[in-house]
Amino acid sequence: MNAAGNTKLTMAQALNQALRDAMTEDDSVLVFGEDVGPLGGVFRITDNLNAEFGDKRCFDTPLAESGIVGLAVGLAMNGMRPVVEMQFDAFAYPAFEQVVSHVAKLRNRTRGALSVPMVIRVPFAGGIGGVEHHCDSSEAYYAHTPGLHVVTPATVADAYGLLRAAIASPDPVVFLEPKKLYWSKEEVDLTRPVPPIGRAQVIREGSDATLIAYGPAVPPAMEAAEIAAQDGRSLQVVDLRSIVPFDDDTVCAAVRSTGRAVVVAEAPGFASVASEIVARVTERCFHHLAAPVRRVVGFDIPYPPPKLEHFQLPSVDRILDAVEDLQWEDS
Amino acid sequence: MKSVAADLLPTDEPLACISADGTGVLDSQIDRPNDSALLAGYAALVRARRLNDQAYALVRQGRLAVYPSSHGQEACQVAAALALEDEDWLFPTYRDTAAVVTRGVDPVEVFVLLKGDWHSGYDPRRHRVAPAATPLATQLLHAVGVAHAAQLRGEKIVAMALCGDGATSEGDFHEALNFAAVFKTPVVFFVQNNEYAISVPLARQSVAPSLAHKGIGYGIPGQRVDGNDLAAVLSVLGGAVAKARAGEGPQLVEAHTYRMQAHTNADDATRYRQDEDVQAWGARDPLTRIETFLRAQGLLDDELAASITAEAEEMAGHIRAGLNTDVPPDYRHMFDHVYAQPTAQLQEQSAVVAEEMERDTTDPEADQ
């Protein structure tokens, strides 16, 4: 793989390259977790890093997520840049206390005297036929915790660029990797900078309504926009990229330009990131709206087993139905 | 044949140097610290006791919101700090104020937390003392991480990680000891077993032969020490730190001691423990014990004792003066240190408070 020039890469390869490049540039970057060493991680995101950088820079730990994140806190307190892998979304929960009580709060607790820059990589969300505990959309837990940045890429270019930015960030970043996009391929130039953490991006122009999505919900939103275009409906698509910090300016400017919006996300809708987006857009853009902001989100159920998961995921049809519901007859 | 495990097991009884009444020397497996180390430890212990007494008084006066006292545990407190070199790190809990002050942190800065101004008041890097941990056992992992980072850079530092008996039931206690053992990290885990976790007695935490026995499950040597014997705690912790620094991996030390006062001022200890137990432990007071011993050995006379007490009084005066110059905490700190740079949303929210304050100062009708 060559970092310069256009290369056809999967998201998994781009993430792997981001880790490699960060480790090459900065000796303090350490990669560790469960099975990330010789195996290269269950999704191969850390492929070959153990061999290239040695066991001090990329290493397996005991199987204990609180231990992994707690160790990262101490390492970060003492000058290292840990990048830890939680093997699956639901496997990160044992680390929740460390994340919420220390990772998120140490800077605040010490009024800036201590900071714990680190990246917590979490393969998240569904769509891969995974069994229970392997498909959770856990973003709201982290987004609700002040002190964390919460980022999720939807494209191969963003996977590389956002992970590099996350590792360079002075703040702890929860980096949510949409599992079902690991094998998506793109022609990318990794040397081309991407917008920073905290910036959303309009990834498809449109004038009739705005679809707001992030992570694994972005591809179905794009597909819906494509199909709608064939029916003469022009849909704009905003990829959040960064849930925290939230880019109110880009999102609201987009909604004001069309006057209608649908938020698309995989997570259960109750008390969700999607709910927050609806609230923010409504508060800020009320007089520009021709219809209530709709959500296409997961049902409020534990993530279903593989043969039922298609009911839970935001389908193109549901997105198009929601768009159709945006009270067009009144305008 | 001696089993491999035998090297990891603690003694059946806690190690001690000085008899409980302070009058004699015990035939002990450990070396007694030299005279100057004992005297330095005694001076620190006098200060620690004065610190606890002063804080207790300040709580009663309503000048501190809360104080988890280490009265009765001061030998452990001072030894934990004195066992360390400048470049080492200390990871205290909320009950370890005396250890933090012994390490050199200004008590007025420590009390920033206890008077409710901010969550932590001192610069952790300056004295290499982590912020006092309120969640149980979580800081033990941070100690492993700090020591691991130093080890990767070839620095010969040791992290002293403190916790109580209740915290040994937490998952992070297990994970920290296991990580430290697997990575052979130079951490001394020092458990102050003071018999109670708020109201819950040790028997409800563990039926292990002792908490030091837990080390064997991780391949870590465990030691038990009489936590009210300053000489013994100094000796055992000093030895554990030396072993960790020499590359022998993590060490576990359990001190047997007693929390003479309630958990905090908000607690009522009469609901869960007997007066006679408290009195029995009072007879084993660590300060009386070392003082009796030093006088019997001819190492301490009235003149020296008076000068040490005067120093402790000076510290108490410094604390009172520090609390007298009370400056209201700055509301902007709530927003300024959530991230390296406040987000747009936090700037808006900070402005809301600024406006409210502006209104309160200009509007004569507003509540003060």
Image (cartoon, grey):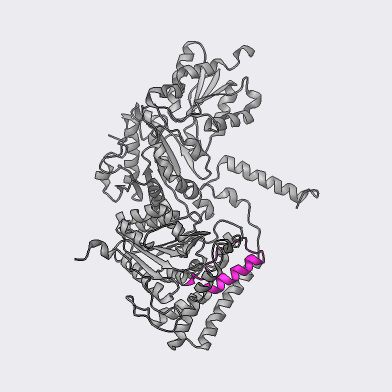
Picture coordinates of residue B259, whole percent (x, y): 51, 67
Determine whether A260 is above or below B282 in the image: above
Of B109 and B296, which appears nearest the observer?
B296
Picture coordinates of residue B91, whole percent (x, y): 44, 61
Splitting the image into 4 quarters, where does residue B297 fall? bottom left
Q: Quadrant of the N terminus of chain A?
A: top left
Horizontally, residue A1 falls left or right of residue A320, namely: left
Of A201 and B193, which appears nearest the observer?
B193
User: Which residue is found at the position 55% from the left and 79% from the top?
Assistant: B311
Of B32 and A238, which appears nearest the observer?
B32
Determine whether A89 is above or below B355 in the image: above
User: Which residue is found at the position 27% from the left and 45% from the top?
Assistant: A50
Picture coordinates of residue B16, whole percent (x, y): 38, 75
Horizontally, residue A15 falls left or right of residue B102, namely: left
Residue A297 counted in the magenta span? no
Asked if one can make out residue A136 in the rendered structure from this viewpoint, the answer is yes
Give the magenta-colored segment's residue range. Answer: B48-74
Picture coordinates of residue A138, whole percent (x, y): 46, 36
Residue furthest to the left: B1
Splitting the image into 4 quarters, where does residue A3 fall? top left
Splitting the image into 4 quarters, where does residue B318 fall? bottom right
Asked if one can make out residue A170 in the rendered structure from this viewpoint, the answer is no
